[in-house]
Image (cartoon, rainbow, N blue to C red):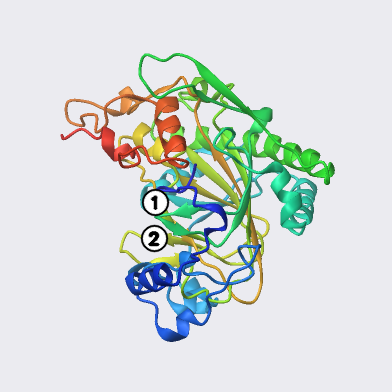
Amino acid sequence: MVAEGAHLPRQHCFVSAQEEQKEKEAILGLASDDRELSGSGLNPFDGFDASFVVPPEHRPSRHLATGSSESFARDIPVIDLASLGYERKSIVQQVGRACEEWGFFQVVNHGVPQTIVQGLKDEAKKFFDSPRGMKLQVKRTADNPLGFNDGELTKNVRDWKEVYDMAPGGFFELPADFEADDTGSVIHRNQWPSFLPSLRRACEDYMEAAEKLAFTLLELMVESMGLPPCRTHKHFESSRTSLFRMNHYPVCPAPELALGVSRHKDTVALTILLQGDVEGLEVKCQDGEWITVKPNPEAFVINVGDVMQVYSNDKYQSIEHRVVVNKNVERYSFPYFFSPGHWVDLGPIPELTSDQCLPKYKSFNWGKYLKRRFDSNYKDLGVPNLQISDYRVNV
């Protein structure tokens, strides 16, 4: 859902034919010492295969992949929500400035209990530490996009990660088809591992707290545009297209060649990311520089998604970001992707347009848009994956 251009690869994503391997290495610019890292095994992360190698122009620089302090020279804004009850105007202004200038910020004193956060982390580690065969009991499929997956691609390159997707409220609802005249919908339900029953409670407690924070942040973003804070509430009430993901990035033998997630933008309204203690998230600044978001265990990282960009008529921008990996320590992260209901028709909020500021996007149905993107994750539709730019109007 989050990564643009994601596609499901063939089983295990290992290149078995020697000639195909050499061709892939030649295309990607692998040197001879890079090829020595290649390997295979039942666990995709037991070795390093050419399918994980990012094209040279998009590889992270070595100092970022190993965590040099140089990458912390700049950092995204940090906003303290503790005074929201009596200094709301100031916080609204800070949020608006961060959205406009960065597209990313961190929040502290956010109201999510630390006991819930720690409970989630503990249960996630238990799940990802389990044998792969057990995790595959809740495997994500073309028929159900919720569950475990260790075969995701971004920009046609294998991500060095494994994930577990689930929906707040227990299910995820999408249109049955992306054709305009189809009004049916399909419900996909969460899958829970029988070998770890405690995971469900930890995830449900966290999702409930994250959704509450998401509505608070939505109100602050909308209010920062000069609108009533509840202006878009009806689009998100009873929404069943929001998604929660647990990410695990194993130790990588070649972090200068691979990425946990290649560059992408989030399709949603906003993302709430629990980053944990290990660095990895990088944000692309307006000047083109990639900076590392310094981990703060007490903070959430917030970013503007495509939906908010459309709402704001490009006042706020959905920003490219990526995840680097390292060879010393594994990393976990937990993004909560907040989205409107599948029935919502998206477009610039009318109050933000005028004769002097014409709408930059034509209206489109969010559910149909999302359905097309999800379908493209599992089969070649013969057309490029949809982007919000496909609905841009020349003004």
Q: Amino acid at mark 1?
A: Ile
Q: Position of residue 194 (x, y in %)?
A: 82, 41
Residue at the spot 80% in from the left edge and 38% down from the top edge: 201
Q: How many marks?
A: 2
Instruction: Give the quarter of the image for residue 207.
Output: top right
Q: Residue furthest bottom?
A: 33
Q: Residue at x 82, y 46 (%)?
A: 196
* Residue 171, position as x, y percentages in the image: 64, 28
Compared across the picture, whether 353 is left or right of 53 comes to left
Image quadrant of residue 27? Answer: bottom left
Q: Which residue is mark 2?
A: 284
Figure check: 151 above or below 81: below
Q: Which residue is mark 1?
A: 319
Q: Amino acid at mark 2?
A: Lys
- Give the residue displayed 66% in from the left and 64% down from the top: 277
Q: Secondary structure at mark 1?
A: loop
Q: Is residue 90 left or right of residue 144?
A: left
Which is nearer the eye, 180 or 26? 26
Which is nearer the eye, 243 or 182? 182
Gap in Å between the C-alphas at discs 1 and 2? Answer: 7 Å
In the rendered image, the vertical position of residue 37 relative to residue 387, given as above or below = below
**Observer-nearest residue: 266 or 350?**
266
- In depth, the one of 156 and 205 nearer the eye is 156
**Viewport quadrant of the C terminus:** top left
Q: Secondary structure at mark 2?
A: strand
Tell me, yes or no, whether the two marked residues, 1 and 2, touch with CB atoms within 8 Å: yes
